[in-house]
Image (cartoon, coloured by chain):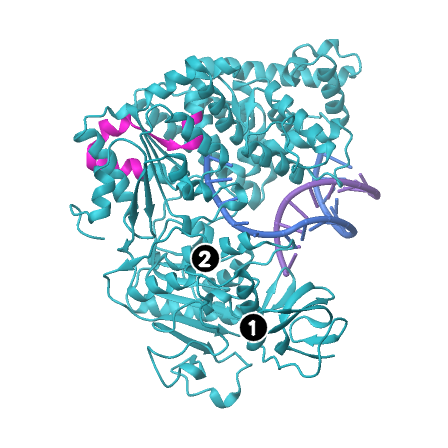
Chain colours: A cyan, B blue, C purple
DNA sequence: GACAGAGGGTTTTTT
DNA sequence: ACCCTCTGTC
């Protein structure tokens, strides 16, 4: 990064821009955060814009926190306090608490997380008597959320949406139950906000409040978020969006990269700035990344460059299997530590979590401190959810999901029969479970003993609710844990797991205390509402690390981070790009490519990419060939090697290793100018037709496995044999620049394959 | 109501 | 291979 006061020309242009739409393409490592913070500081200091009139929106709390932190250094803490910096969801929640009543949203609404949402769907499906096997709650919820992300309700389905009436019914019930519970999901936060903005009075009030709006990671916005931004800046168009279409990796959760690509169309006259100078990585890494992203179609034209030195070459390492891979990654980390590297500067990436275990075992065996990013989040743990369910129920008695969660937790003799009857009783009176509890003596279907136990719960909740008026939030939680017997039940359990749960609860109490301290410092009265809001919109608590550790994470988790040493593992076809059960389209493939680009651009200086010949995953062996993305790396600045464990290279090529590593035969003689593996096709020209890439892929896989040219005539109906797919039948003969066929292979389906990789069966 | 065993499903993650 | 969920038994 250049020194702290200097900005390069495009950076300076983005910073100095004040009014009208501004689109900033921020390449990886191009000093984006710096530009954003300088720009906000400039608006305040030079242009005299009041901080409370500036809204900066991010996607994660972490990004919002970082932005605030950086701004504090630039503009001072009192300025930052007045700025609106937050995630889409947090910002909407904040505004909806103030103005939501206009659209029928009570002030104390709860935000249901994915688990809660699933519980609502499950209940809806049961009430509709729908088979959970045919309609898995998970999948129904997914379909519902997809619709909501596009801004559609159950009565606004499009023709292309599902034909399934049952899902629509479930959707309708889901929405009704959310409304009855005074709860919203994450999509509602955005959707309600858009609806509010569409109302004259309230909408104008909010619009007038913010004169300058900034959106970070704009390529991650979904349809509704984009609509929200447009509605918000409708009158003044003072909107600055920052992002990188090459780093769009969240299509599968609704993000639409076209939002950034078409911004210019929707905001005519927008100023466009491209930040292309990379300050993070070595020349070899920047050019390696460029090689991988270049074949991506429809990119906004731009080219990352750097003045940094070339640095060491990128290494591509062929390994025998995942254990071999883990062993070499571990060895290299030990070497790096030996050479003085800080373990906090080392990261190991993989495509899917399932790859982490072997790496973890290897690191543990070598006594290397590591941390795994991902996995079960603090706020998703059962005991934390239970405790929070009590608190949420105290605050919003109508929240049935929370009532059902704690009604018999800890066990208090309220079994499924009683619960079913209570639910039916509440349903017959069209009221919430809590209301039903209030008049439980009138429930004729419920046995006297059960009524008594339910009455006990009602009284308990009443007592705790009264506490809420007088006690601090943390005291309410402690009181709840004691009075409900939750803590006692765990103490009695006396297992290591119960101990861990108790610790988590203690941690939760600590989190509330932190919140209380912060609230008081900010001049606010700590409240249960305030705390619960924070929790709902935060996925995890930041864990402070005392000791530097190696970081293990998925490539998705790595976005936005950078490391001196990056190990990118599992770069095989079907692992990365990942091959899922369902067939994936060209767009999914392009997202995989962008994901690979993201991975590479995380590295500052050292990048080691590994692939294996065989890998155990999900209980099966996958035979791997190097990822097509490896084939897209430039020849220069990349060296290919293999471990001694790799068997498929003839022995004569294996030279004396410097210890464990072999240079690949084709890169032995030369260093920098070594051609990449002969199995790797030259990078396809960006203009290559889509079909060409597909053929490349086949070429790639087969040649590596030592495929043979075909002999004899191949025509429709011919039986052919393919190295990878086995025996199949030719369905049609096509031209892909050279003879190719579409053939059906049992277990693989129809594949397009070059004829020279087939032999007659 | 606790627990064992079967069964199903497995990319990626935030809010 | 592994993990979560559901179901049936005691």
Up-down relation of residue A296 to residue A177 (above or below): below
x 37%, y 32%: residue: A86
Q: Which x, y percent locates residue A79?
A: 23, 28
Question: Magenta segment range?
Answer: A67-92
Residue drawn at (61%, 18%) of the image: A180
Quadrant housing residue A687: bottom left
Q: CA distance from mark 2 to mark 1?
A: 19 Å
Q: Disc 1 marks which residue?
A: A699
Crowding around mark 2 (Cα neighbors within 10 Å: few <14, some 14 to 19, many 20+) is some
Image coordinates for residue A277, horizontal then vertical, percent: 27, 54
Helix or strand or loop: what does disc 1 sit on? helix
Task: Check disc 2 and report its element: helix, strand or loop.
Answer: loop
- Seen from the viewer's position, the closer of residues A647 and A282 is A282
* Image quadrant in which you'd find residue A540: top left
Magenta highlight on residue A89 = yes
- Rendering coords of residue A304 (x, y %): 32, 57
Question: Label 2 belongs to which residue?
Answer: A296
Q: Is A317 located above or below residue A261 in the figure?
A: below
Q: Please tell me whether residue A670 is drawn above or below residue A467 in the rendered image.
A: below
Q: Nearer the viewer, residue A507 or A291?
A: A291
């Amino acid at each position: 990064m250049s020194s702290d006061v200097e900005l390069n020309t495009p950076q300076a242009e983005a910073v100095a821009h004040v009014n009208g739409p501004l689109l900033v393409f921020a390449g990886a490592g191009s000093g984006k955060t710096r530009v954003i913070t300088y720009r906000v500081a400039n608006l305040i200091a030079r242009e005299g814009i009041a901080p409370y009139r500036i809204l900066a929106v991010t996607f994660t709390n972490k990004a919002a926190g970082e932005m605030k932190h950086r701004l504090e250094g630039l503009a001072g803490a009192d300025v930052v306090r007045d700025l609106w910096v937050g995630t889409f969801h947090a910002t909407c929640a904040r505004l909806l608490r103030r103005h939501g009543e206009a659209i029928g949203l009570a002030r104390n609404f709860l935000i249901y997380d994915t688990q809660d949402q699933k519980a609502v769907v499950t209940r809806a499906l049961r009430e509709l008597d729908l088979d959970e096997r045919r309609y898995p709650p998970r999948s129904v919820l997914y379909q519902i959320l997809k619709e909501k992300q596009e801004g559609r309700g159950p009565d606004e389905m499009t023709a292309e949406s599902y034909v399934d009436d049952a899902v629509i019914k479930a959707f309708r019930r889901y929405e009704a139950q959310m409304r009855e519970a005074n709860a919203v999901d994450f999509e509602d936060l955005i959707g309600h906000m858009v609806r509010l903005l569409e109302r004259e009075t309230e909408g104008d009030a909010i619009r007038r409040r913010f004169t300058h709006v900034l959106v970070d990671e704009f390529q991650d916005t979904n349809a509704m978020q984009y609509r929200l931004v447009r509605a918000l800046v409708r009158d003044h168009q003072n909107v600055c969006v920052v992002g990188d279409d090459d780093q769009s990796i969240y299509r599968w959760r609704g993000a639409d990269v076209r939002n950034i690509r078409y911004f210019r169309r929707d905001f005519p006259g927008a100023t466009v700035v491209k930040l292309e100078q990379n300050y993070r990585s070595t020349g070899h890494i920047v050019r390696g990344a460029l090689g991988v992203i270049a074949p991506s179609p429809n990119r906004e034209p731009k080219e990352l460059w750097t003045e940094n030195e070339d640095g060491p070459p990128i290494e591509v390492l062929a390994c025998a299997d995942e254990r071999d891979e883990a062993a070499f990654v571990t060895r290299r980390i030990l070497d790096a530590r030996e050479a003085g590297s800080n373990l906090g500067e080392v990261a190991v990436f993989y495509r899917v979590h399932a790859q982490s275990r072997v790496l973890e075992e290897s690191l543990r065996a070598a006594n290397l401190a590591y941390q795994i990013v991902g996995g079960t989040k603090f706020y998703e743990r059962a005991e934390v959810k239970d405790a929070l369910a009590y608190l949420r129920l105290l605050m919003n008695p109508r929240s049935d999901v929370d009532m059902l969660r704690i009604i018999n937790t800890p066990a208090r003799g309220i079994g499924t029969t009683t619960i079913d009857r209570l639910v039916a009783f509440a349903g017959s009176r069209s009221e919430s479970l809590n209301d039903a509890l209030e008049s439980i003596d009138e429930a004729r279907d419920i046995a006297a003993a059960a009524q008594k136990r339910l009455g006990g719960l009602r009284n308990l909740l009443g007592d705790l609710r009264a506490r809420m008026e007088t006690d601090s939030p943390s005291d309410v939680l402690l009181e709840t844990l004691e009075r409900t017997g939750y803590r006692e039940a765990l103490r009695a359990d006396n297992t290591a797991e119960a101990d861990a749960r108790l610790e988590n609860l203690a941690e939760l109490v600590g989190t509330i205390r932190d919140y209380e301290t912060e609230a008081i410092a900010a001049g606010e009265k700590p409240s249960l509402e305030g705390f619960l809001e924070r929790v709902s919109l935060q996925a995890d608590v930041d864990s402070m690390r005392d000791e530097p550790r190696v970081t293990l994470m998925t490539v998705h988790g790595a976005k936005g981070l950078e490391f001196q040493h990056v190990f990118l593992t599992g770069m095989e076809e079907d692992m990365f790009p990942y091959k899922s059960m369902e067939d994936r389209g060209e767009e999914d493939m392009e997202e995989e490519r962008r994901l690979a680009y993201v991975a590479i651009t995380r590295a500052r200086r050292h990048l080691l990419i590994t692939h294996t010949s065989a890998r155990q995953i999900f209980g099966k062996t996958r035979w791997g060939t190097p990822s097509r993305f490896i084939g897209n790396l430039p020849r220069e600045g990349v060296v290919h090697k293999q471990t001694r464990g790799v068997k498929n290279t003839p022995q004569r090529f294996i030279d004396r290793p410097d210890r464990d590593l072999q240079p690949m035969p084709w890169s032995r003689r030369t260093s920098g100018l070594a051609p990449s593996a002969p199995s790797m096709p030259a990078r396809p020209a960006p203009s290559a037709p889509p079909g060409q890439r597909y053929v490349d892929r086949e070429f790639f896989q087969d040649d590596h496995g030592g495929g043979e040219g075909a002999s004899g005539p191949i025509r429709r109906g011919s039986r052919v044999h393919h190295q990878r797919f086995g025996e199949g039948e030719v369905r049609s003969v096509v031209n892909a620049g050279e003879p190719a066929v579409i053939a059906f292979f049992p277990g693989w389906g129809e594949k397009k394959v070059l004829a020279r990789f087939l032999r007659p069966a």
